[in-house]
Image: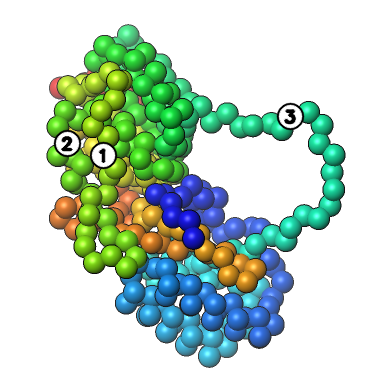
Amino acid sequence: MKFYFTINILLLSFLQVNAQSATDTLSRKETDSLISNYCRVLNQTYFDKALSKEITAVLEKKLKAGEFYGVSRITNRLSLLLRNITRDKHFYIGINKPSDTTHSVQTGEPEVENKNGGFSEAKIIDKNIGYIKWNEFIADEESFQKIIAALQFLKGCRYLIFDISECPGGDGRIGGFVDSHLFEDNDYQNLLRKKCTDETEWHQSEVPYNYSNGPKFYNTPVFVMVSKHTGSAAEYFALTIKETKRGIVLGDTTAGAGNPVTMVTFRNYFAYIPICQIVTEDGKSIEGKGVIPDVLLKTDNWLKETIDYIKNYR
């Protein structure tokens, strides 16, 4: 079983029905097997044991009433039902594709997508506003070096914008790395608490990075742009900025998909099941709610609107 800090499949399937799910209906025996095996892995994996028992009871009751028999795209039906019960958008059940047994001849080198460490743009606007477009939370040495290079380029700017309005999330460790360049003390690292499957105590959620050779922006006003497409680890980056009053969050309410998940497989299915719960010091969760921005952006040009806001910022 592989555990993830966050998951990027949010935009692919969690916010809408996956059109690639099987359309064929299952037999009664296959349906019984699907529900039985899913309940088994749910009870083994989900962080909320009491709620997993309630979910199991609901599924078994509906199965006994015949509500799942003869249903096309039953995995979609189950995924939506699970999200409605838990308010957790990371719940998902899918069908494993059969292995491709055909043979093909590959010519040349395979094309590798250049994700640029998760960052797509760094520029200086109006001579004194630094802007970073952040598309994906990737935590590896390349990403660390990319953000250091971007911050070095923007060193000396009077204001700093992080645009995560199209960022579905990813590995939360990069958020902690960036935070180490924005916060002078480490108190912010205690804002988020996490408790995972089979754990009895809450512990610090953010992975601390207390040293980097990158430039620091401790006294630079920070502005974070978010939208309904901002998910998972990206939401927690925005939440940390907002809750600590380190900066201003602008845009629209985020996706509200914050609990880390893992993928489990059973029979010819796979499922994403939340394995941790993350809350603030005072117990607030963004799951199913999202991060509400300090400033609601209303025009068709959010960047211009943000720049206009900064120019009037005191």
Mark toward the start of the polypeptide (3 vs 2): 3
| Residue under label 2 | 186
Q: Position of residue 112 (x, y in %)?
A: 64, 32
Amino acid tagged 1: Pro
| Residue under label 3 | 109
Which residue is the extreme one toward the top?
127
Amino acid tagged 3: Glu
Residue placed at 44% from the left, 34% from the top?
140
Is residue 219 something that shows in the picture? yes
Q: Residues within 10 Å of mark 3 (few under 14, many from 20)?
A: few
Residue 133 left/right relative to 160: right
CB under 8 Å between discs 3 and 2: no
- Which quarter of the rendering shows the C terminus? top left
Q: Quadrant of residue 88?
A: bottom left
Which residue is the extreme one toward the bottom?
64
Residue placed at 25% from the left, 28% from the top?
211
Between the residue at mark 1 and the residue at mark 2, the CA separation in whole angstroms equals 8 Å
Q: Residues within 10 Å of mark 1 (few under 14, many from 20)?
A: some
Between the residue at mark 3 and the residue at mark 2, the CA separation in whole angstroms equals 45 Å
Is residue 297 something that shows in the picture? no
Residue placed at 69% from the left, 68% from the top?
23
CB under 8 Å between discs 1 and 2: yes
Q: Position of residue 83 (x, y in %)?
A: 43, 66
Q: Position of residue 214 (x, y in %)?
A: 30, 20
